[in-house]
Image (tube, rainbow, N blue to C red):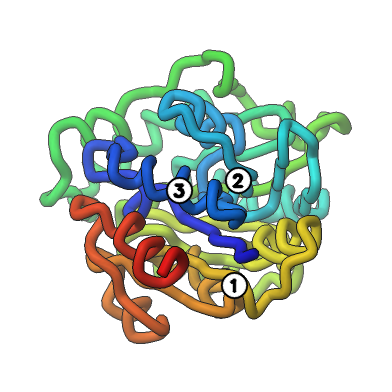
Protein backbone atom coordinates (compact mmCIF):
# COMPACT_ATOMS: atom_id res chain seq x y z
CA UNK A 1 0.00 0.00 0.00
CA UNK A 2 1.23 3.47 -0.90
CA UNK A 3 0.08 6.94 0.09
CA UNK A 4 -0.02 9.55 -2.66
CA UNK A 5 -0.31 13.22 -1.66
CA UNK A 6 -1.45 15.50 -4.48
CA UNK A 7 -1.48 19.29 -4.56
CA UNK A 8 -4.49 21.06 -6.12
CA UNK A 9 -3.75 24.36 -7.89
CA UNK A 10 -1.24 23.91 -10.69
CA UNK A 11 -1.23 20.16 -10.10
CA UNK A 12 -4.51 18.24 -9.94
CA UNK A 13 -6.53 21.22 -11.14
CA UNK A 14 -6.19 22.38 -14.72
CA UNK A 15 -5.72 26.03 -15.60
CA UNK A 16 -9.53 26.15 -15.86
CA UNK A 17 -9.78 25.02 -12.20
CA UNK A 18 -11.19 21.62 -13.12
CA UNK A 19 -10.11 18.04 -12.43
CA UNK A 20 -9.95 16.23 -15.76
CA UNK A 21 -11.77 12.98 -16.39
CA UNK A 22 -8.37 11.35 -16.96
CA UNK A 23 -7.14 12.45 -13.53
CA UNK A 24 -10.37 11.36 -11.87
CA UNK A 25 -10.17 7.92 -13.48
CA UNK A 26 -6.52 7.53 -12.47
CA UNK A 27 -7.25 8.45 -8.84
CA UNK A 28 -10.13 5.96 -8.66
CA UNK A 29 -8.00 3.23 -10.24
CA UNK A 30 -5.23 3.95 -7.73
CA UNK A 31 -7.68 3.73 -4.84
CA UNK A 32 -9.20 0.52 -6.21
CA UNK A 33 -5.69 -0.93 -6.36
CA UNK A 34 -5.43 -0.57 -2.58
CA UNK A 35 -3.53 2.70 -2.32
CA UNK A 36 -4.52 5.85 -0.42
CA UNK A 37 -4.80 9.13 -2.32
CA UNK A 38 -4.93 12.37 -0.33
CA UNK A 39 -5.23 15.99 -1.44
CA UNK A 40 -2.80 18.39 0.22
CA UNK A 41 -3.44 22.02 -0.65
CA UNK A 42 -3.03 25.58 0.53
CA UNK A 43 -6.78 25.99 0.15
CA UNK A 44 -9.07 25.81 3.16
CA UNK A 45 -10.35 22.30 3.99
CA UNK A 46 -13.94 23.37 3.23
CA UNK A 47 -12.89 24.54 -0.23
CA UNK A 48 -11.01 21.30 -0.97
CA UNK A 49 -13.95 19.19 0.16
CA UNK A 50 -16.31 21.09 -2.15
CA UNK A 51 -14.00 20.63 -5.14
CA UNK A 52 -13.70 16.89 -4.47
CA UNK A 53 -17.46 16.55 -3.98
CA UNK A 54 -18.14 18.41 -7.24
CA UNK A 55 -15.87 15.91 -9.02
CA UNK A 56 -17.28 12.88 -7.15
CA UNK A 57 -13.99 12.03 -5.42
CA UNK A 58 -13.51 10.84 -1.84
CA UNK A 59 -10.02 11.43 -0.39
CA UNK A 60 -8.38 12.44 2.90
CA UNK A 61 -7.90 16.20 2.94
CA UNK A 62 -4.95 18.24 4.23
CA UNK A 63 -5.89 21.91 3.99
CA UNK A 64 -4.24 25.26 4.73
CA UNK A 65 -0.86 23.83 3.70
CA UNK A 66 -1.21 20.66 5.73
CA UNK A 67 -2.09 22.37 9.01
CA UNK A 68 -5.57 20.77 9.10
CA UNK A 69 -6.22 17.15 8.14
CA UNK A 70 -9.60 15.43 7.78
CA UNK A 71 -10.40 11.80 7.01
CA UNK A 72 -14.09 11.02 6.43
CA UNK A 73 -15.12 14.30 8.12
CA UNK A 74 -13.11 13.40 11.22
CA UNK A 75 -10.41 15.88 12.30
CA UNK A 76 -7.13 13.97 12.42
CA UNK A 77 -4.53 16.73 12.81
CA UNK A 78 -4.45 20.50 13.39
CA UNK A 79 -1.61 22.96 13.94
CA UNK A 80 -2.47 26.56 14.83
CA UNK A 81 -0.49 29.76 15.26
CA UNK A 82 0.26 30.86 18.81
CA UNK A 83 -1.86 33.83 19.88
CA UNK A 84 1.10 36.20 20.20
CA UNK A 85 2.49 35.20 16.79
CA UNK A 86 -0.90 35.68 15.14
CA UNK A 87 -1.23 39.14 16.68
CA UNK A 88 2.29 40.10 15.60
CA UNK A 89 1.73 38.98 12.01
CA UNK A 90 -1.62 40.79 11.85
CA UNK A 91 -0.09 44.00 13.23
CA UNK A 92 2.69 43.93 10.62
CA UNK A 93 0.20 43.40 7.80
CA UNK A 94 -2.14 46.13 9.01
CA UNK A 95 0.72 48.61 9.44
CA UNK A 96 1.84 47.94 5.85
CA UNK A 97 -1.75 47.98 4.50
CA UNK A 98 -1.30 44.47 3.06
CA UNK A 99 -4.39 42.68 1.71
CA UNK A 100 -4.64 39.34 3.51
CA UNK A 101 -6.94 36.46 4.39
CA UNK A 102 -6.94 34.50 7.63
CA UNK A 103 -7.62 30.76 7.42
CA UNK A 104 -9.14 29.53 10.67
CA UNK A 105 -10.95 26.65 12.33
CA UNK A 106 -14.17 28.52 11.53
CA UNK A 107 -13.65 29.52 7.92
CA UNK A 108 -11.77 32.26 6.12
CA UNK A 109 -11.76 35.82 7.47
CA UNK A 110 -11.07 38.83 5.24
CA UNK A 111 -10.64 42.49 6.29
CA UNK A 112 -13.27 44.95 5.13
CA UNK A 113 -10.39 47.05 3.78
CA UNK A 114 -9.19 44.32 1.37
CA UNK A 115 -10.13 46.23 -1.79
CA UNK A 116 -8.79 49.49 -0.32
CA UNK A 117 -5.39 47.93 0.38
CA UNK A 118 -5.26 46.37 -3.11
CA UNK A 119 -6.20 49.71 -4.69
CA UNK A 120 -3.43 51.50 -2.78
CA UNK A 121 -0.65 49.30 -4.14
CA UNK A 122 -2.05 49.37 -7.70
CA UNK A 123 -2.24 53.18 -7.62
CA UNK A 124 1.38 53.31 -6.41
CA UNK A 125 2.49 51.89 -9.76
CA UNK A 126 4.50 49.12 -8.06
CA UNK A 127 2.02 46.28 -8.61
CA UNK A 128 3.19 43.36 -10.78
CA UNK A 129 -0.15 42.89 -12.52
CA UNK A 130 0.75 43.19 -16.22
CA UNK A 131 0.39 39.45 -16.83
CA UNK A 132 -2.87 39.00 -14.95
CA UNK A 133 -5.89 37.84 -16.90
CA UNK A 134 -9.07 39.92 -16.61
CA UNK A 135 -10.71 37.30 -14.39
CA UNK A 136 -7.68 37.18 -12.07
CA UNK A 137 -7.55 40.98 -11.85
CA UNK A 138 -11.25 41.13 -10.92
CA UNK A 139 -10.79 38.39 -8.31
CA UNK A 140 -7.99 40.17 -6.45
CA UNK A 141 -9.43 43.69 -6.66
CA UNK A 142 -13.04 43.05 -5.69
CA UNK A 143 -13.97 43.12 -2.03
CA UNK A 144 -14.78 39.51 -0.99
CA UNK A 145 -18.39 39.01 0.03
CA UNK A 146 -19.56 36.95 2.97
CA UNK A 147 -20.80 33.43 2.28
CA UNK A 148 -20.75 30.00 3.94
CA UNK A 149 -16.94 29.98 3.91
CA UNK A 150 -15.89 33.65 4.04
CA UNK A 151 -16.49 36.16 6.83
CA UNK A 152 -15.60 39.87 6.68
CA UNK A 153 -14.31 41.82 9.69
CA UNK A 154 -13.91 45.55 10.40
CA UNK A 155 -11.00 45.25 12.83
CA UNK A 156 -8.67 42.27 13.10
CA UNK A 157 -9.00 42.39 16.90
CA UNK A 158 -12.52 40.98 16.43
CA UNK A 159 -10.88 37.81 15.16
CA UNK A 160 -7.74 37.70 17.30
CA UNK A 161 -9.68 38.12 20.55
CA UNK A 162 -12.14 35.35 19.69
CA UNK A 163 -11.06 32.43 21.91
CA UNK A 164 -13.12 29.94 19.89
CA UNK A 165 -11.31 30.59 16.60
CA UNK A 166 -7.91 28.96 15.97
CA UNK A 167 -5.74 30.48 13.23
CA UNK A 168 -3.97 28.11 10.83
CA UNK A 169 -2.70 30.44 8.11
CA UNK A 170 -2.32 34.00 6.88
CA UNK A 171 -2.56 34.30 3.09
CA UNK A 172 -0.99 37.59 1.97
CA UNK A 173 -1.48 39.10 -1.48
CA UNK A 174 1.91 40.56 -2.51
CA UNK A 175 1.59 42.67 -5.65
CA UNK A 176 4.70 44.77 -4.92
CA UNK A 177 7.78 42.54 -5.32
CA UNK A 178 10.04 44.78 -3.21
CA UNK A 179 7.45 44.80 -0.45
CA UNK A 180 7.13 41.02 -0.74
CA UNK A 181 10.88 40.55 -0.27
CA UNK A 182 11.02 42.84 2.76
CA UNK A 183 7.94 41.26 4.34
CA UNK A 184 9.32 37.76 3.76
CA UNK A 185 12.48 38.67 5.67
CA UNK A 186 10.60 40.29 8.55
CA UNK A 187 8.19 37.38 8.98
CA UNK A 188 10.97 34.85 8.40
CA UNK A 189 12.80 36.20 11.43
CA UNK A 190 9.92 35.23 13.71
CA UNK A 191 10.82 32.04 15.58
CA UNK A 192 7.32 30.63 15.81
CA UNK A 193 6.25 30.82 12.18
CA UNK A 194 6.89 29.17 8.82
CA UNK A 195 6.80 31.40 5.72
CA UNK A 196 6.29 30.00 2.22
CA UNK A 197 4.75 30.91 -1.14
CA UNK A 198 2.53 29.17 -3.66
CA UNK A 199 3.00 31.74 -6.41
CA UNK A 200 4.63 35.01 -7.41
CA UNK A 201 1.92 37.17 -5.86
CA UNK A 202 1.56 35.70 -2.38
CA UNK A 203 3.15 34.77 0.90
CA UNK A 204 1.70 32.25 3.34
CA UNK A 205 2.40 32.17 7.06
CA UNK A 206 1.75 29.17 9.32
CA UNK A 207 2.95 27.88 12.68
CA UNK A 208 6.59 26.73 12.42
CA UNK A 209 5.55 23.05 12.28
CA UNK A 210 2.64 23.70 9.95
CA UNK A 211 3.43 22.43 6.45
CA UNK A 212 2.39 19.81 3.92
CA UNK A 213 4.96 17.31 5.22
CA UNK A 214 3.15 17.28 8.56
CA UNK A 215 -0.12 16.59 6.77
CA UNK A 216 1.48 13.78 4.78
CA UNK A 217 2.97 12.19 7.91
CA UNK A 218 -0.32 12.40 9.83
CA UNK A 219 -2.20 10.47 7.13
CA UNK A 220 0.66 7.98 6.65
CA UNK A 221 0.69 7.24 10.38
CA UNK A 222 -3.09 6.87 10.44
CA UNK A 223 -3.00 4.19 7.74
CA UNK A 224 0.21 2.56 8.96
CA UNK A 225 2.12 3.45 5.79
CA UNK A 226 5.88 3.92 5.97
CA UNK A 227 7.14 7.32 4.79
CA UNK A 228 9.31 5.60 2.18
CA UNK A 229 6.10 4.23 0.65
CA UNK A 230 4.68 7.70 0.04
CA UNK A 231 4.56 9.76 -3.15
CA UNK A 232 4.10 13.54 -3.33
CA UNK A 233 3.08 15.46 -6.46
CA UNK A 234 3.32 19.25 -6.57
CA UNK A 235 4.41 22.34 -8.46
CA UNK A 236 5.45 25.13 -6.08
CA UNK A 237 7.36 26.06 -2.94
CA UNK A 238 4.55 25.37 -0.47
CA UNK A 239 4.72 21.76 -1.75
CA UNK A 240 8.43 21.47 -1.00
CA UNK A 241 8.13 20.06 2.57
CA UNK A 242 5.99 17.12 1.43
CA UNK A 243 8.12 16.62 -1.68
CA UNK A 244 11.24 16.40 0.51
CA UNK A 245 9.55 14.08 3.02
CA UNK A 246 8.00 11.62 0.56
CA UNK A 247 9.66 8.47 -0.66
CA UNK A 248 9.19 9.68 -4.24
CA UNK A 249 8.83 13.34 -5.23
CA UNK A 250 7.11 14.21 -8.50
CA UNK A 251 7.23 17.72 -9.97
CA UNK A 252 4.63 18.92 -12.44
CA UNK A 253 5.82 19.81 -15.93
CA UNK A 254 4.41 23.31 -15.36
CA UNK A 255 6.06 23.56 -11.93
CA UNK A 256 8.52 26.15 -10.74
CA UNK A 257 11.97 25.45 -12.28
CA UNK A 258 13.60 25.28 -8.84
CA UNK A 259 11.06 22.72 -7.64
CA UNK A 260 11.65 20.60 -10.74
CA UNK A 261 15.38 20.55 -9.98
CA UNK A 262 14.76 19.27 -6.45
CA UNK A 263 12.35 16.44 -7.31
CA UNK A 264 13.11 12.81 -8.18
CA UNK A 265 11.05 12.83 -11.39
CA UNK A 266 9.00 15.21 -13.53
CA UNK A 267 5.57 14.42 -14.96
CA UNK A 268 3.49 16.20 -17.60
CA UNK A 269 1.87 19.60 -17.01
CA UNK A 270 -1.45 20.06 -15.22
CA UNK A 271 -3.21 20.77 -18.53
CA UNK A 272 -1.76 17.51 -19.91
CA UNK A 273 -3.17 15.24 -17.16
CA UNK A 274 0.19 15.14 -15.40
CA UNK A 275 -1.28 13.56 -12.26
CA UNK A 276 -2.80 10.68 -14.23
CA UNK A 277 0.50 10.14 -16.04
CA UNK A 278 2.43 10.07 -12.75
CA UNK A 279 0.00 7.69 -11.03
CA UNK A 280 0.13 5.30 -13.97
CA UNK A 281 3.90 5.38 -14.36
CA UNK A 282 5.12 5.55 -10.76
CA UNK A 283 2.34 3.85 -8.74
CA UNK A 284 0.14 1.56 -10.83
CA UNK A 285 2.98 0.07 -12.87
Q: CA distance from mark 3 to mark 1?
A: 41 Å
Residue at the spot x=45%, y=62% of the render?
Answer: 197
* Residue position for label 1: 188
Give percent across and percent down for residue 219: 72, 57
Nearer-the-camera pick, 152 or 259: 259
Q: Earlier in the sequence, mark 1 or mark 2?
A: 2
Circle 3 Cα neighbour tier, 10 Å, few/some/many (<14 / 14–19 / ≥20): some
* Residue position for label 3: 29
Give percent across and percent down for residue 25: 37, 42
Residue at the spot x=39%, y=23% of the render?
Answer: 143
- Left-right relation of 221 to 127: right
Residue 166 visible from this viewpoint: yes
Circle 2 Cα neighbour tier, 10 Å, few/some/many (<14 / 14–19 / ≥20): many
Picture quadrant where residue 260 is located: bottom left
Residue 179 visible from this viewpoint: no
Secondary element at tag 1? helix
Locate the N terminus and report the quarter of the image it occupies: bottom right
Nearer-the-camera pick, 160 or 283: 283
Q: Earlier in the sequence, mark 3 or mark 1?
A: 3
Secondary element at tag 2? strand
- Left-right relation of 249 to 94: left
Residue 37 vertical placement versus 74 (above, below): below
Tag shown at residue 63: 2
Amino acid sequence: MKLIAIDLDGTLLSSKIKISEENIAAIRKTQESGHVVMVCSGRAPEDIKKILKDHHLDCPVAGSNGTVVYIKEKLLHMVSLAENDAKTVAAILEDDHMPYRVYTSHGIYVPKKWSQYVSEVIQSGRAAIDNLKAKEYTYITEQPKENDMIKVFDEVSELLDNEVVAIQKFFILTLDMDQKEKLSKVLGNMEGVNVTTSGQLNLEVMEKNGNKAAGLRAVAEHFGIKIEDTVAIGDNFNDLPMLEAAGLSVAMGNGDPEIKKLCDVITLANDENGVAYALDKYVLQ
